[in-house]
Amino acid sequence: MRTIRARRVLVLANPAAGPRKGRDEGGAVARAVSRAGVRCELERTRAPGDASRAAASAPAAGFDLVLAVGGDGTVHEAAQGIAGSGVALGVAPAGTMNLLARVLGIPLDAPRAAELLVLAGRRLAFRPGRAGERLFVLMAGIGFDAWVLREVLRRARGRPSMRHYAWGALRGLRTYRFPEIRFDAGDGRRLRATSAVVGRAPLYGGWLRPTPRASLERDELEICVFRGRSGPDYLRMAPSLWSGSHVDRADAEARIVTAVRGESHDPDVPVQLDGELAGTLPMEFGVSGRILVLAT
Amino acid sequence: MRLLLRNGRVLDPASGVDDTLDVLIEDGRIARLEAKIPARGAEVADLAGLVVCPGFLDMHVHLREPGQEWKETIATGTRAAAAGGFTGVACMPNTVPVNDSRSVTESILRTAARDAVVAVYPVGCVSKGQAGEELAEMADMFEAGARAFSDDGQPVASGLLLRKALEYSRLFDVPILDHCEDSGLVAGGVVHEGDVSTRMGLRGWPGVAEDVVVQRDVLLAEYTAGRLHVAHLSTGRSADIVRRAKKAGIRVTCEATPHHLALTDEAVSGFDTNAKMNPPLRPESDRRALLKALQDGTVDAIATDHAPHHADEKNVEFSRAPFGIVGLETAVSVCLDRLVHGGTIGLPRLVELFTSGPARILGLAKGTLAPGADADVTVLDPNRRVTVDPARFRSKSANTPFAGWSLRGAPVMTLVAGRIVHDGR
């Protein structure tokens, strides 16, 4: 892997991200980058779409590294703008889960991570997942988890916390209707499900492992479908997601795919990408041709 | 030719010397070792403040020649060794062709006589073609100069073959160096099986894949009374097995690498292929167990497993990158900094692990500064600050996870048979 040797860094901070909102993580990261002797500019996002737009303009503005200060949602947005440009995207973790930082082994301390990436970062080129026209870095969730996310966002004032998600999931187990979804991987075998996760990385929601064989290294996705028909069915399956043993259960199945199309008779099966809502089925999932260079 | 090494702290664990002494070298041998030796026409090197040790030996090196000269050659590998403080290296047989016959052993020694700046001790294959099926012509290779036998790069998978090798090698009392790995249990793993492999989505390689083979080998060593040497120990349980075997009087020795002593599997974070090696880096609990094994004498030698690979070979996806890192030019500094200054072991024990330890295993009359011995000498500056800069390596390859590390302690001068082959004072 080649080193980055950043000379000009755009620090893209999402002040609304993470459990420590209110702390000026963006400012702390910018100071850490300056201390490392590298020029940087700090831009704070104000609304959804800002991070994507700022990241998209970074290559033309002469930046050779964009540091997303925030969580996986911030990385998701920045990735939309920067993929295909060759400019590296680094994460200075300041979100709730920070899954990408965990996968990459980046310290969960934003200024320290920034300093490491600027001084000794390497370029990891990979092909992100694609869902319709959008890219995803970690995972796509279809059905239950996206529905929970949508409900939580609808009810919470401001950015929801882990507690909100936990309550939302419990509420969903009682009220979600679990409509049937069909997946077609184009190889003649169809998968029936009530929810699914399409993984580009092995971790999900902390330490859950619905797609343990997914890796940033492989130009493939792992799809894991769940066939439970009720809240209790899902509740019984949930513990096995920690160990990855759910794939041995009759009501779950995981497969490596290069592309898969999901559809449902129900017109309202929501989809989330990296924890961001992204519309409803039908949708095609695959591996993007746009290379995303991650700083690691 | 006479050379007088003056005012250094002479540290020779094999003969129990640790004192400020002068060392007089005459005709490539240690002539005298006394408090004040008059120069009387000898060339003088003032080594005040430095430590004068027997020449360091690295018993596990891949010189890649013949056949893979884009990675390393005997010329570049031995220059890297000299710069790293080593006066002799044992080179593993997984070259192209593999060193499984007298002609290849002789060819390596001929090239070494022409190109090498330090001593080269060939290790011959256990099996023909390193295929793990039929015993290689070990006696032939021994006569030609092979000092040990191994199928390194891969294990001796067949218990029957290992039994035969251990029995046959008793005829000339050389060790069988086994790379202990149960390939079935490894199952395509590329990093240690644990938290790191889980979160990175990389196939895991459990420590037990080493342990079961170490245990089998020890049982066979006991059964055959052959000499077994366990290469690059990486797990605490393997260290326990060796410890118990030694207590039981079984003829087993083992080595540990600087990287398994200094790094954990966290080093592969970010998919750094320069931290991909075989056996893989293990978690902190195993690293600590290896440190304990260094302290209590279970480990007999530190060896680098110097495994050069071209940057283009390493600059690929983690799963596809070859295993191995270079180590000759970082080993001594890493060990001085992490093990001696880190408080794990004292300097005499470290010197023993690099000198008399490997010399004993390989049956070499080396690893001592006693008068009459070959004047192979390594001079250390235990307090010199160095920063690892792969661009300055003498090795053809730069695949190291230690790039940029600031370390305290370095080899500063290397003499082989009384001749200075590296002088970085």
Image: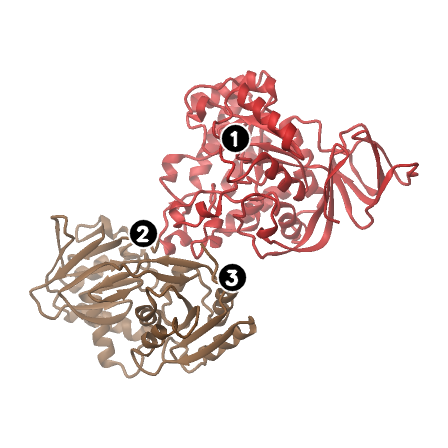
Chain colours: A brown, B red
- Secondary structure under the numbered disc 3 in the rendered image: helix
For label 1, the residue is: B66
Residue type beneath disc 1 = Pro
Q: Marks 2 and 3, Cα distance to the nearest angstrom?
A: 24 Å
Does residue A8 sit above or below A238 in this rendering?
A: below
Q: Marks 1 and 3, Cα distance to the nearest angstrom?
A: 35 Å
Question: Do callouts 2 and 3 mark residues in contact (Cβ within 8 Å)?
Answer: no
Q: Where residue B204 sits in the image (x, y, percent)? A: 38, 46
Tell me the chain of label 1.
Answer: B
Q: Is residue A129 left or right of residue A231?
A: right
Question: Do callouts 1 and 3 mark residues in contact (Cβ within 8 Å)?
Answer: no
Q: Where residue A265 sits in the image (x, y, percent)? A: 6, 65
For the image shown, how many numbered marks are present on the structure? Answer: 3
Q: Where residue B397 sits in the image (x, y, percent)? A: 54, 45
Tell me the chain of label 2.
Answer: A
Residue type beneath disc 2 = Arg
Tell me the chain of label 3.
Answer: A
Q: Residue at x 57, y 50 (%)?
A: B262
- Secondary structure under the numbered disc 1 in the rendered image: loop
Question: Do callouts 2 and 1 mark residues in contact (Cβ within 8 Å)?
Answer: no
Q: Residue at x 47, y 30 (%)?
A: B96
For label 2, the residue is: A218
Q: Residue furthest left?
A: A265
**Does residue B250 appear anywhere in the picture?**
no
**Does residue B342 appear anywhere in the picture?**
yes
Q: Nearer the viewer, residue A148 or B58?
A: B58
Q: Callout 1: few (<14), some (14-19), or many (20+) C-alpha neighbours within 10 Å?
A: many
Q: Earlier in the sequence, mark 2 or mark 3?
A: 3
Q: Which mark is residue A146?
A: none
Residue type beneath disc 3 = Ala
Q: Which mark is residue A120?
A: 3
